[in-house]
Amino acid sequence: MQYDYIIAGGGGAGLSLLYRILHQETLREKQILVIDQDLKNKNDRTWCFWEEGEGLFEPVVRHQWPTLEFKTEQFVNKFALQKYRYKMIRGLDFYNYVLDVATKSERVTFKHEKILHLSSQNDQAKVITDSGQYEAAYVFNSTSLLNPKINTDNSLLQHFMGWEIKTSKPMFDDQVGTLMDFSLNQDHGATFMYVLPVNSQQALIEYTLFSPVVLDKDTYRNQLATYINGVLGISEYNIVDDEFGVIPMSLQKFRPSLGKHIINIGTAGGHTKASSGYTFQFIQKNTQSIVQNLVAEKSPLVKPSFREKMFQWYDRTLLEVMISQKMTGKAIFATMFKKLAPEKILTFLDNETNFLQDLSVMSSVPTVKFLPSALKQMFR
């Protein structure tokens, strides 16, 4: 069968795009194939992000925090959010929400197959799986098949293990989330904890690092147990859920497309922020733009604006400083949270500041350490 769109990879990016397409009346006749070897019936990840007002996936926001904390051994910056709320979406809730809509549509087909190869020629794109091959006018790819090669010279990994724990008595303030607690051993690289309470007795605790290599699983477990007991003062708890993930933070350029008919989305399309690893909101911006182009009968390949290219440069600069060890991740973020209004930092990390605000953020970090990296990334 000939499809209009093939979504290669049914994760956060692929399903966000599918959901947006299905809610566009002008695209109601389009035949869509979604290919992913996984059933998406497990809670394999948690997305956290800050947002103004209510977003498209507000119905599956599990919890949101009006107040956040940034911590080191030297200081604590506790701040009430004004325009933003920090939000959490569980992967399984997101999958179920989108799939509940999609499986009721006669124009959406799902195939649980392993994707082996993507190709584009003339006015068609082709996906080859372990069970067959499929063609469409456009393929939206979020698999890693077309990713650039990354190594320790051009990339860091954001890797993390999270435990959702439940205590027998109230131990948490569910109105306050810990965005970053850097008061940990930094021997392996930039290392911090998230603490995100969803009620007074339950919280997601996540041990996170920006470093070149992934650690032994027991190291994450030991660090989580030590923090929960020693810092949070909790000795009795049950682990009700857990997760582990690795996100690339790379100087390598992820190409936006292969030809005109294979469009890369999500991390595959370069929509993981290189300096922080945040992805969910950048997926939403990109998939919204793709659908707007489809509705307007334009190419779904969204070209970055001048401002978006500027933010990519800022990201590569900050990441290069960390990779080259000119300044640690802990020192960078601590400096920013000491000198700047926290919401300005969040707005900057969300690529929503204006140029004058950019300058104030850049002036908060040491020029002697950042300028060489900025010039290097400008001309690469």
Image: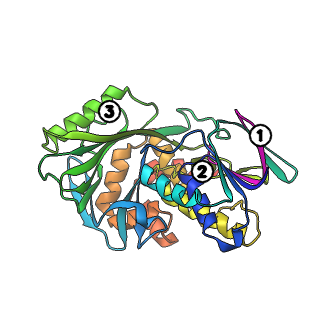
Give the labeled residue for mark 2: 270
Residue at the spot 16% in from the left edge and 43% down from the top edge: 231
In this view, the mark in front (1 or 3): 1
Q: Nearer the viewer, residue 294 or 246?
A: 294
Task: Residue 26: give x, y in percent of width and height.
Answer: 70, 73
Give the labeled residue for mark 3: 220
- Under tag 3, what secondary structure? helix
Q: Nearer the viewer, residue 309 or 139?
A: 139
Mark 3 and mark 1 in contact (Cβ < 8 Å)? no
Quadrant in the picture for residue 31: bottom right
**As shown in the figure, which amino acid type bears the numbered disc 1?**
Gln
> Is residue 105 left or right of 75 when viewed as pictured?
right
Quadrant in the picture for residue 63: bottom left
- Under tag 1, what secondary structure? strand
**As shown in the figure, which amino acid type bears the numbered disc 2?**
Gly
Color encoding of the figure: rainbow
The CA span between labels 1 and 3 is: 41 Å
Instruction: Bin the neighbour count of mark 3 within 10 Å (Cα to Cα): few under 14, some 14-19, many 20 and up.
Output: many
Residue at the spot 59% in from the left edge and 53% down from the top edge: 14
Q: Nearer the viewer, residue 174 or 128?
A: 128
The CA span between labels 2 and 1 is: 26 Å
Instruction: Bin the neighbour count of mark 2 within 10 Å (Cα to Cα): few under 14, some 14-19, many 20 and up.
Output: many
